[in-house]
Image (tube, rainbow, N blue to C red):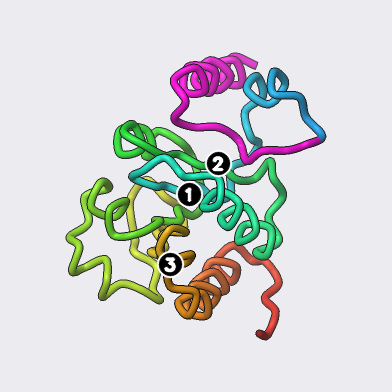
């Protein structure tokens, strides 16, 4: 119980600052949502910028297409993303764009060459998965096909059923 209280305090602290929150759910009130830690966090999405509404909507669709339940995902964005991502236990980290990769200590050239692969990291059981930022996918819709291929790799790593596109 003590560990659960610690998680709750941590998520409340982050939510109060607007930097991290469980994936939005219309069936849960905002107060309940900020007071319960996701259990377990299977996928953590990291963005170096705060997502605009359209970007957040696209990311929500991407996570749903992977077959993840809302409670299994956490999104960390903005200035504290680099400082907080490694403190959250997750099986797989979705690195949204080269900026997020750079914030996590990845060389931008290495991030680009790592597309389509899982980058091992000691704090993440399955690793880091580089993917285009939703902002870039909105600007370049033709890149969505590659993003889906990347998401399917993440699905296989998480043991989720993959669908042929």
- Residue sitting at 47 percent across and 59 percent down? 134
Q: Residues within 10 Å of mark 1 (few under 14, many from 20)?
A: many
Query: On residue 45, which mark appears?
Result: 1
Question: Along the polypeptide, which appears first: circle 3 or circle 1?
Answer: 1
Per the model, the C-alpha gap separating discs 2 and 1 is 6 Å
- Residue sitting at 58 percent across and 19 percent down? 8
Read off the residue under disc 3: 139
Residue 11 is left or right of residue 46, and the answer is right
Question: Along the polypeptide, which appears first: circle 2 or circle 3?
Answer: 2
Query: On residue 96, which mark appears?
Result: none
Residue extent of the magenta highlight: 1-26
Secondary structure under the numbered disc 3 in the rendered image: helix
Q: Nearer the viewer, residue 156 or 116?
A: 116
Secondary structure under the numbered disc 1 in the rendered image: strand
Read off the residue under disc 2: 74
- Label 2 close to label 1 by CB (< 8 Å): yes
């Amino acid at each position: 119980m003590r560990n659960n209280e610690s998680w709750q305090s941590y998520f409340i602290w982050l939510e109060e600052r607007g930097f991290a929150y469980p994936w939005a759910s219309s069936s849960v009130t905002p107060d309940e949502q900020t007071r319960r830690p996701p259990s377990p966090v299977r996928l953590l999405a990291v963005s170096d910028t705060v997502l605009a509404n359209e970007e957040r909507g696209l990311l929500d669709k991407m996570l749903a297409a992977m077959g993840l339940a809302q409670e299994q995902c956490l999104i960390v964005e903005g200035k504290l993303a680099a400082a907080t991502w490694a403190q959250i236990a997750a099986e797989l980290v979705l690195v949204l764009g080269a900026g997020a990769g750079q914030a996590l200590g990845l060389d931008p050239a290495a991030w680009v060459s790592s597309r389509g692969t899982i980058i091992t990291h000691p704090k993440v059981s399955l690793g880091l998965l580089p993917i285009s930022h939703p902002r870039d996918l909105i600007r370049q819709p033709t890149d969505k096909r590659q993003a889906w291929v990347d998401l399917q790799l993440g699905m296989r790593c998480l043991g989720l059923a993959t669908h042929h596109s």
